Image: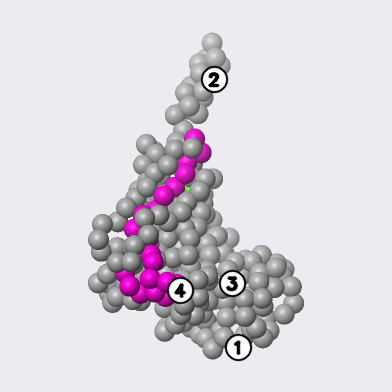
Amino acid sequence: MKFAALIALGLVASAAQAEVIVAADYVNPTERYAHGILGDKIEFAGLRVTLSNGAERTAIWPELVVFEDTNPRLVDLDGDGAPEVITVESHALAGARLAIWGIDATDRLVPYAHTEFYGTPFRWLAIAGAADLDDDGFAEIAYIDRPHLAKRLMVWRYRPQGASTGTLELVATQDGLTNHRIGERDIGGGLRRCDNGLEIITANADWSRVIASRLVDGAIATDDLGPHSGRASLDAALGCQDI
Ligand SMILES: [Ca+2]
Ligand SMILES: [Ca+2]
């Protein structure tokens, strides 16, 4: 009798489980943030996610903020097996910030965490990737801080605080790295896992070398992989090939 009651409880719990995000895209193109760093003057006012039951949820920023990014990235940041959405948001008066979105227990699309806006318009960041870079059980998000100016790799750790919110903590930085030039429509490099664990692939500051960066004991360790010769060399590095 006790056993039957436990099984019934299990069924109820699984029926009440929230949907998961299976896709995300930027929607509602707008020219209201005239930065043009990604090859045109079009950014996006909205973030749309598709849930596992086929339903869609959309968040639309009012006038001052846009999504300024190549595409939203789905990565499980809080370790519950379902992805969150990594975005870059830019404010007309204050420039970009890293922003994490997800769905809450009632399947609403809600902000989970964000960094601070730069404080100056037209300051941008280019996402390199997100994963548990140092095997400490928490996911990190890596991006290049102002890829045309500062050229600094920054790694932030996401710490869940409850089911649908969390904090972002700066873990490590490394100067002299970049992954985007003005006007390019894509971001070069990304994450790879070859013989050396998880590595962040970028160019160096003057685009002459391909660099692999690892998060080790709270600091960045870099390896020079060879000469940079356009996206092909970054793609070769991502594919664990010699360059
Ligand atoms: Ca998750
Ligand atoms: Ca970690």
Q: Earlier in the sequence, mark 4 or mark 2?
A: 2
The reply to whether discs 3 and 4 touch (Cβ–Cβ < 8 Å) is no
From what the image shows, is residue 55 above or below residue 229?
Answer: above
* Secondary structure found at label 4: loop
**As shown in the figure, which amino acid type bears the numbered disc 1?**
Ser
Give the x, y percent position of residue 33.
31, 69
Q: Earlier in the sequence, mark 2 or mark 1?
A: 2
**As shown in the figure, which amino acid type bears the numbered disc 3?**
Gly
Q: Residue 122 in magenta? A: no
Q: Is residue 169 left or right of residue 131?
A: left
Disc 4 designates what residue? 39
Disc 2 designates what residue? 7
Give the x, y percent position of residue 121.
29, 75
Disc 3 designates what residue? 189
* Secondary structure found at label 1: loop
Q: Nearer the viewer, mark 3 or mark 2?
A: 3
The answer to which of 128 and 221 lies nearer the viewer is 128
Q: Nearer the viewer, mark 4 or mark 2?
A: 4
Residue extent of the magenta highlight: 33-53
Question: Which image quarter holds the N terminus?
Answer: top right
Disc 1 designates what residue? 208
The answer to which of 133 and 146 lies nearer the viewer is 146
Q: Residue 50 in magenta? A: yes
